[in-house]
Image (cartoon, coloured by chain):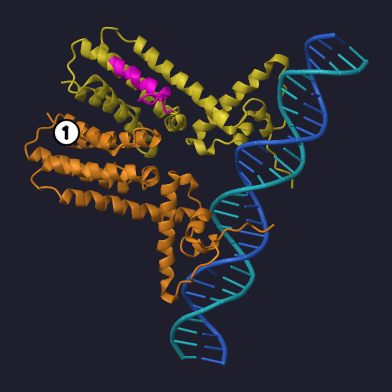
Chain colours: A orange, B yellow, C blue, D cyan
Amino acid sequence: MPDEVDIAPQRTRNRWGEGERLRVEILDAASQLLSELGAADGLTIRGVARGVGIAPASIYRHFTDRAALVRGLLEHEFARLRSLMLTADEHCDPEDVVGRVRAQMHAYCAFAVAHPGHYRLMLSNGASRPGPEERPEGPLMEVVETLVAAFTRCAEAGHELRVPGRRAAEIVFVGAHGHVALVHSLPSRTGAQNIKAFVDDLIALVFV
Amino acid sequence: MPDEVDIAPQRTRNRWGEGERLRVEILDAASQLLSELGAADGLTIRGVARGVGIAPASIYRHFTDRAALVRGLLEHEFARLRSLMLTADEHCDPEDVVGRVRAQMHAYCAFAVAHPGHYRLMLSNGASRPGPEERPEGPLMEVVETLVAAFTRCAEAGHELRVPGRRAAEIVFVGAHGHVALVHSLPSRTGAQNIKAFVDDLIALVFV
DNA sequence: TCAGCTACCAAACGATTGTTCACACACTTG
DNA sequence: CAAGTGTGTGAACAATCGTTTGGTAGCTGA
């Protein structure tokens, strides 16, 4: 028996310089598949190919590996997350330093709650590159450092902290991650409202 | 070609009433396999069979399903976690209510750090049974309720809280879970020392 | 017109998985 | 000793997967 029907029936072939077009279509399909599945282990080459409507082999023209596809996805999604946090920060009154911390964390949580599959993947693989020096690198640590800077700003603006700025950032970030992870695990109480309140409580706690 | 060599060469067959023996051997092998893998998606029927040294089909004499095997594992591990937390609590001075909270959380984190595969599985599937009433049930919620009781005891003993007792328990539990999850994701900084300090900081924050 | 390149695909290979089914052993009971 | 039951096996089925190989269809530049 042949290998099974893996492809959708019809599809207009890409034109000459447009090979890149399929690459982003593949990434988009992978992204959507990941959203539907909610877990990265179902993110298969063949599934993505089905989503785009192409043959599985065609993916190998654009990505050498399944791992390369995943890396491409990760890069794209981390960029999206950073951008969301940044615009949230920019839409605040620059003087309201604590409000800016809250806004960034709310953006972070909103992304995480809205895209469980992406988020899980990002936190499993987002801290690659162990970091030559003491601290690990990776896109995830950039997020944390952004938060550290925000808390430092708060301290400089006169908002007294009960722990050092870096520690406060760690506590808030780790707590937010914990809540997100629980929301993802538990089918009930998926309200984004709860998580906002939780993060606000957490932020309030680190200030005197 | 035959289906491959799935079994270890020799093995003494169980005697009459000892069918149950293989059942626990299977659970033990599954537990160890889960420890080695660190993730539940590699926990296969055939892998467990290889671990015990039996044929894959033999597992179906003791578990109807792969899902049933996983349920069996979960039950066993949740019992272990509860017992660890309880004995940690009992080894404290009963008067030192805050110390008892700390001890229970340290036990929780120690288990989680030592058994990443089990912990992940327990948090993915530990909140089944959506709960007929308002709150979800499941063995995980029992742990949280234990913690709520501990914090309530603190409040009654005169330790003033900055948030209600239930909220304090949530914050500490969620924060601990977040730290555990991050330790599992990040290869570096796996120190159990860090997590103890983190939990202690968190507990300190919820008191005035 | 026609070689050459881009873009893609059908088919297959080898591996793994959960699950089933008929069978064989060992021991107990009649 | 014979029947029956507990206990485990060998072989196979159907499904899925990642990846490779050898193409083909169509556009492009000479």
Tag 1 residue: A164
Q: Quadrant of residue A23?
A: bottom left
Residue B51, percent from left and from top: 61, 31
State the residue at coordinates (31%, 49%): A139
B108 to A145, vertically: above or below: above
Magenta stretch: includes residue B142: yes
Task: Give the magenta part as a residue range.
Answer: B130-150
B85 to B30, vertically: above or below: above
State the residue at coordinates (45%, 22%): B78
Camera sees residue B7: yes
State the residue at coordinates (35%, 54%): A75
Residue B90, percent from left and from top: 36, 9
Camera sees residue B55: no
Asked whether, in this view, residue C11 is left or right of residue A88, the answer is: right
> Circle 1 — which element?
loop
What chain is tagged by disc 1? Answer: A
Q: Classify the position of the C terminus of chain A by image quarter.
A: top left
Q: Classify the position of the N terminus of chain A by image quarter.
A: bottom right
Magenta stretch: includes residue B70: no
Instruction: Count the marks.
Output: 1
Q: Amino acid at mark 1?
A: Pro
Asked whether, in this view, residue B77 is left or right of residue D7, the answer is: left
Asked whether, in this view, residue B152 is left or right of residue D27, the answer is: left
Residue extending farthest left: A158
State the residue at coordinates (26%, 46%): A143
Residue A27, percent from left and from top: 41, 58
Pick the front one: A189 or B40: A189
Residue C30, percent from left and from top: 85, 9
Pick the front one: B33 or B20: B20
